[in-house]
Amino acid sequence: MEKIVSFDKQGRIYLPEELRRYLQLKTFIAKIQGGGIYLQPVEDDPLEALSTLGKERLRGKSIEQLKKEARAELEENAAKKIRRH
């Protein structure tokens, strides 16, 4: 699927509704790649992303603690990946 998009005066990119419905995600890492911009999806729910790591890592921690740790890890990884490009 391809759509032509453009930046507004504040530097934001508008994604047409068709693309947003198809992607069903709201958070992305923007990368410069091959002379263009690549949007890599990031899980909207950090707890859901953590659940794939196994229940052992989740034991004894509150939901709020897990969400905080997951968000911090996602932000750290995103920052590292953006700095590399």
Image (tube, grey):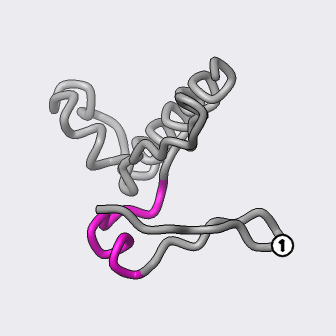
From the top left corner, tell me how far across and down residue 2 is, in percent: 36, 62
Q: Using the rendered view, name the quadrant where residue 32 is placed.
A: top right
- Choose between 26 and 36: the one closer to the eye: 36
Residue appearing at x 64%, y 23% in the figure = 85
Residue appearing at x 60%, y 33% in the figure = 35
Q: Using the rendered view, name the quadrant where residue 76 is placed.
A: top right
Judge whether 23 appears above or below 51 on screen. below
Name the main secondary structure of what is drawn in magenta. Answer: helix
Judge whether 84 appears above or below 79 on screen. above
Q: Is residue 44 left or right of residue 8?
A: left
The furthest residue to the top: 84
Q: Which residues are magenta?
A: 17-27
Report the quarter where the N terminus lies: bottom left
The furthest residue to the right: 9
Kindly identify which residue carries mark 1. Answer: 9
- Choose between 56 and 75: the one closer to the eye: 75
From the top left corner, tell me how far across and down residue 21 is, in percent: 30, 75
